[in-house]
Image (cartoon, grey):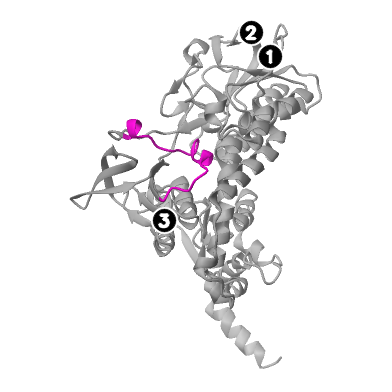
């Protein structure tokens, strides 16, 4: 679910065969809501990643549970419609441009003027891919699974009933998974001038000649680089002194250098004062280093974070505690202040990722349906959560970073492997990155890892698995990694740790034994 325009056609444009197919799957206009039974075993509010996993998982148990799934706008939520799927499809096209522009280093000459970018075709592919994937999240699929799918605004009428239009849905258990929407920063004139967010940018069919991106977090950095590669002159504004606030300075520096090299203009530690319109131009007035300046652009893209969708649910009546900016409050078992109601996904988690929504949904399934049978409960605090920023190179992280360890007063030791020492990275002409693995001093216990590399998002899962299952660096050193791969960087880091275990006495003994070999 999301706030904003009420019409599905306002949310999904332009009107073409791809988008019509999408709407037919995730918000069919001829849909008739079912007649509810006397009571549901489970009512799920919001058909984004978390809600879909809860509903499908409960239906898949095959024990005859009565399940209802309610969606206000578009099934699939932000991930399918405005987030992961369209953005990564868009970024894939931009990455091809990046590859072509460094082809000279590989001995392949492609003149810059020979690279023809058909922006309209790029965006049509975004719509085509999104439409094709919508079948998995479709209303008909969930109906076939045995789930009663309702479209409309869900509102609690009491602590055990949800109202959708004229239908009252009583429940034994409920899950709130209404997601989040793009924040709109309080900048004077921005609303009247108009701006794009991730919820509207993929409706573009023409590439903005000059684009301002407000916000230097993952969304802002990803889209700034992609638009720059696909033909825009991008200016990226960020209030902080470095991009990617959550990352260590070395990581931010690497991404800043890459964006600058590609032509993105970075305006850091900047305060935007106001936005005005002059004809078709949008003028951004800002202050940086005590100086007032302005730039003229054709479009403004805002990527300043996300706000939970709590509006309109009537949570007070249900006895569910929340705050507008923080979302629904849950305990470690994802239970709200109403013990019959759980929450999952962006509505309640600080980690606003599809993979954490999925993980939270599985916790809810276990705790809501199985814990009453004495099968134990799962805690959200036990999750090991990796994150990836899909710039080029990518930034991937899991566990503690240097900064977070310092903030918590936790001592760490760090092993760094530059990708200039990784054979596959050398072969691929991708040597700019690095991997840092943080471990407990005098122990091989892994506390976290950060990597900057073109395929960092694919590599980080090995470290996530090791942390989740208590595998130390010694164990990773003993794992055979295929050669040559960039994941071999992990083995190099593990081998580096193993070498630290060689004491001076051991080294002298080895030298002595060499005389007899």
- Point 70% across, 92% down: residue: 516
Tell me the mark number nearer the camera, choosing from 1 and 2.
Answer: 1
Secondary structure under the numbered disc 3 in the rendered image: loop
Mark 3 and mark 1 lie on one chain; the one further toward the N terminus is 1
Q: Which residue is disc 2 drawn over?
A: 167
CA–CA distance in space, label 3 to label 1: 49 Å
- Point 59% across, 34% down: residue: 379
Q: In this rendering, does residue 417 appear at all? A: no
Secondary structure under the numbered disc 2 in the rendered image: strand
Q: Residues within 10 Å of mark 1 (few under 14, many from 20)?
A: some
Mark 3 and mark 2 lie on one chain; the one further toward the N terminus is 2
Q: Quadrant of residue 366?
A: top right
Q: Which residues are magenta?
A: 190-209
- Asked if the residue under mark 2 is in contact with the one under mark 3, i.e. CB atoms within 8 Å, the reply is no
The location of residue 515, given as percent across then percent down, is 66, 93
Q: Which residue is disc 3 drawn over?
A: 248
The location of residue 133, given as percent across then percent down, is 69, 39
For the N terminus, the quadrant is top right
């Amino acid at each position: 679910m999301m706030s904003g325009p009420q019409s599905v056609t306002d949310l999904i444009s332009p009107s073409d065969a791809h988008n019509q197919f999408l709407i037919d799957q995730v918000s069919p206009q001829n849909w008739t809501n079912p007649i509810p039974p006397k009571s549901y075993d489970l009512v799920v509010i919001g058909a984004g990643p978390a809600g879909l996993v809860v509903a499908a998982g409960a239906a898949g148990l095959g024990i005859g549970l009565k399940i209802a799934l309610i969606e206000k706008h578009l099934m699939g939520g932000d991930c399918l419609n405005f987030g992961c799927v369209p953005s990564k499809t868009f970024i894939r096209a931009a990455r091809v441009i990046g590859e072509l522009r460094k082809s000279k280093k590989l001995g392949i000459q492609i003149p810059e003027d020979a690279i023809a970018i058909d922006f309209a075709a790029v965006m049509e592919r975004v719509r085509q891919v999104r439409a094709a994937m919508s079948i998995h999240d479709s209303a008909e699929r969930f109906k076939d699974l045995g789930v009663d799918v309702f479209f409309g605004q869900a509102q609690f009428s009491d602590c055990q009933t949800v109202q959708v239009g004229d239908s009252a849905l009583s429940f034994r258990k409920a899950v709130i998974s209404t997601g989040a929407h793009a924040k709109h920063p309080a900048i004077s004139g921005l609303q009247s001038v108009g701006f794009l967010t991730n919820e509207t940018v993929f409706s573009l069919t023409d590439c903005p000649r000059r684009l301002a991106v407000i916000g230097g977090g993952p969304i802002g950095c990803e889209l700034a680089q992609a638009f720059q590669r696909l033909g825009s002159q991008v200016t990226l504004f960020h209030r902080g002194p470095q991009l990617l606030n959550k990352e260590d300075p070395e990581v931010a520096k690497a991404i800043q250098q890459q964006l600058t090299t590609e032509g993105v203009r970075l305006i850091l530690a900047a305060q935007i004062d106001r936005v005005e319109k002059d004809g078709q131009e949008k003028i951004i007035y800002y202050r940086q280093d005590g100086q007032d300046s302005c730039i003229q652009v054709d479009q403004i893209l805002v990527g300043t974070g996300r706000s939970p969708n709590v509006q309109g649910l009537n949570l007070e009546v249900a006895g569910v505690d929340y705050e507008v900016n923080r979302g629904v409050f849950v305990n470690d078992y994802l239970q709200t202040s109403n013990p019959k109601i759980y929450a999952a996904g962006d509505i309640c988690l600080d980690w606003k990722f599809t993979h954490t929504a999925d993980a939270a949904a599985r916790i809810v399934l276990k705790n809501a349906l199985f814990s009453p049978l004495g099968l134990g409960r799962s805690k959200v605090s036990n999750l090991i959560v990796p994150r990836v920023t899909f710039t080029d190179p990518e930034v991937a992280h899991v566990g503690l970073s240097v900064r977070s360890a310092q903030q918590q007063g936790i001592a760490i030791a760090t092993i760094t492997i530059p990708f200039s020492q990784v054979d596959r990275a050398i072969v691929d002409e991708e040597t700019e990155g690095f991997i840092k693995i943080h471990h407990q001093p005098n122990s091989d216990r892994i506390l976290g890892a950060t990597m900057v590399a073109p395929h960092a998002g694919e590599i980080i899962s090995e470290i996530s698995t090791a942390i989740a299952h208590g595998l130390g660096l010694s164990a990773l050193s003993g794992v055979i990694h295929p050669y040559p791969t960039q994941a071999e960087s992990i083995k190099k880091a593990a081998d580096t740790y193993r070498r630290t275990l060689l004491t001076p006495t051991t080294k002298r003994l080895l030298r002595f034994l060499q005389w007899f070999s």
